[in-house]
Image: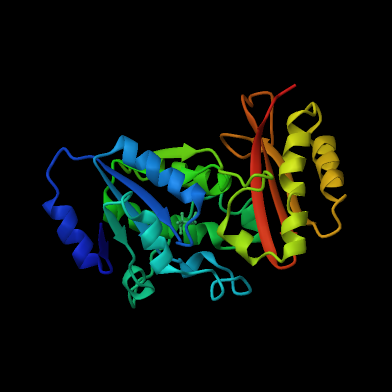
Amino acid sequence: MQTYHTLAEWRDYRRRLAAGLTLGFVPTMGSLHAGHLQLVRRARAENALVVVSIFVNPTQFGETEDFECYPRDLARDLEALHGLADVVFCPTADMIYPLGSSTCVEVAGISDMLLGAIRPGHFRGVATVVTKFLNLIQADRAYFGLKDYQQLQSIRRLVADLFMPTEIIALPTVREPDGLAMSSRNQRLSASERAAAVIIPKALEYAKVSTLSDPDRFEEAVRAFLAREPLAQVASVDVRDADTLEEISPMTKCAVLLLAVRFGTVLLIDQAELFLG
Ligand code: PAF
């Protein structure tokens, strides 16, 4: 496994790759867990070579958010990737955003709604850095988790809109034994917050067996379910069209429930596809 820290090293490797070898790419912010490793394993199974990026992207964190205390442990991440990835690419912020760089990518509509309204600028930061990495890596396939559903949909949109040749592959959320979605943020929960956070998968289970005929009442019922847990501060509960993320309509083929819930200062998100009753 090679570890590259500079764009020049990566570009040199990319240039020397034999034509016809497929390349799978898993972008991450490090602090790897079983959810990331599932993406890497899938990339391994479907491509000749696998590259994983580790880059804590400053532009997707708001001023009051957790960029500084975002967990970082490169040695542990490299150990986890040993035998799974061919290349780990971990550039510095100065390389990804050199002095004078001024181009941003914004997926209009999707970026500002839902979680985008709670975290202004977040999806612009994600879209910008993912565009930069997709351009640098030139992968055949790139792998993302379904948990970050709005991120996934905005990346699918930008790849289609900008005619990028990389295929976007989404994989289901990997969960802890009690159902909580794996996330680097879980490490920042206190013991009581961690125990309380199980209300999220329970709310998803409750929603999946409820009938969705009136979205407003459905969202209200899910909010009430989450409110049973005193440590859960509900940031948003939304039922949307799974393709467009717009409100559901008679045209909706598949609906998705999107949850964002705070435990102390930690914002957790999760999602589930819904049966349209
Ligand atoms: O999902 C993440 O870890 C990040 O948002 C991503 C896609 C690596 C961009 O920084």
Query: Which residue is at 36% across, 58% downward?
Result: 53
Q: In which quarter of the image is the C terminus?
A: top right
**Residue 88: image location, x then y, percent:** 31, 59
- The front one of 24 and 239 is 24
Residue 19 at x, y percent in the picture: 13, 41
Q: Is residue 9 visible?
A: yes
Query: Is 54 on the left or on the right of 50, as rendered?
Result: right
- The one of 40 and 132 positioned closer to us in this rendering: 40
Above/below status of 159 relative to 101: above
Specify the quadrant that holds the N terminus.
bottom left
Q: Which residue lies at the image location 51% right of the left edge and 48% below the top edge?
A: 35
Taking the image as shown, residue 129 lies to the left or right of residue 112, namely left
- Judging depth in this view, the residue of 73 and 136 nearest the camera is 73
Q: In this view, does 74 lie above or below 243?
A: below
- How far from the left and from the top, in percent, is residue 144? 46, 45
Q: Tell me if residue 109 can be seen.
A: no
- Residue 146: percent from the left, percent from the top? 54, 42
- Classify residue 271 by image quadrant: top right
